[in-house]
Amino acid sequence: MLNKRKKRALNRDIPHLKDTRIVFIGIEGGSEESREAKYFDIFNEEDIRLQFKVIPCRENRSSPLHVFRHLKNEIDKEPLREDDEIWVVIDVDRYHEHLPEVARLCVDARYNLAVSNPCFEYWLLLHFRDPKRKYKSCKDVKKPFSIEMENDSKNNDGYHAIFYPKFKDAIKRAKERDVEDERWPNENGSRVYQIVERFI
């Protein structure tokens, strides 16, 4: 289980970190301060042998194709180990037409793909509730998500305190919605649960 501890440096050149397993995640967010980056950083507060390295997009270029290409450029510079994992975390929201090509590229590169519909904030919202209405865009999701965050932040400080206790509820809700045999959800849903479930 994850317990809140001080983050460790991600550097396998350090002798006692040589056995560290790294999960590389390409995201649409443009900085380490994005919601995706803060969320996956939760995992870096626990096991020295497992570290998440989030690779955000730059220059405000957040299309799924750019996420994949930027991630691949960065991965090609990394000395990968056999047990490392690579994930592309993207949204349906604005670039639905790019998804088939990105899915194909991920298969060819042996990357994992986790798509949220309409966006990553829907996955975050699943930590708080099981939404009953349909959200057509990320803008629709952000309002209820912001309300839940504001309410929860009054009693909890930071993403670890807010989201970690709700991991299992979010996974359960996402799985219940994941009934399509497709590479990404065509209705509201998120496959990010597949990442979280592997490492808790």
Image (tube, rainbow, N blue to C red):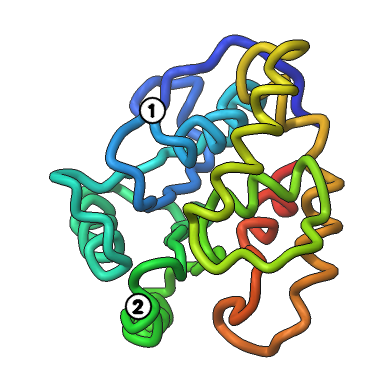
**Relative image position of residue 178 (x, y in whole percent):** 75, 74
Please give the residue where the numbered disc 1 appears in the rendered image: 33
Work out how far the residue at label 1 is from the one at label 2, CA to CA, in angstroms.
25 Å
| Residue 39 found in image quarter | top right
| Residue 102 tag number | 2
Q: Amino acid at mark 2?
A: Val
Furthest toward the left, the residue is 59
Q: In terms of sequence position, does the residue under pointer 1 or pointer 2 come before the other?
A: 1
Residue at horizontal 43 percent and vertical 66 percent from the top? 93
> In the image, what residue occupies the spot 28% across and 41% down?
30
Up-down relation of residue 121 to residue 154 (above or below): below
Residue that appears at 74% across and 50% down:
126
**Dots 1 and 2: beta carbons under 8 Å?**
no
Indicate the quadrant where residue 163 lies: top right
**Depth order, front residue of 183/35:** 35
Closer to us: 50 or 40: 40
Question: As displayed, is residue 42 above or below residue 125?
Answer: above
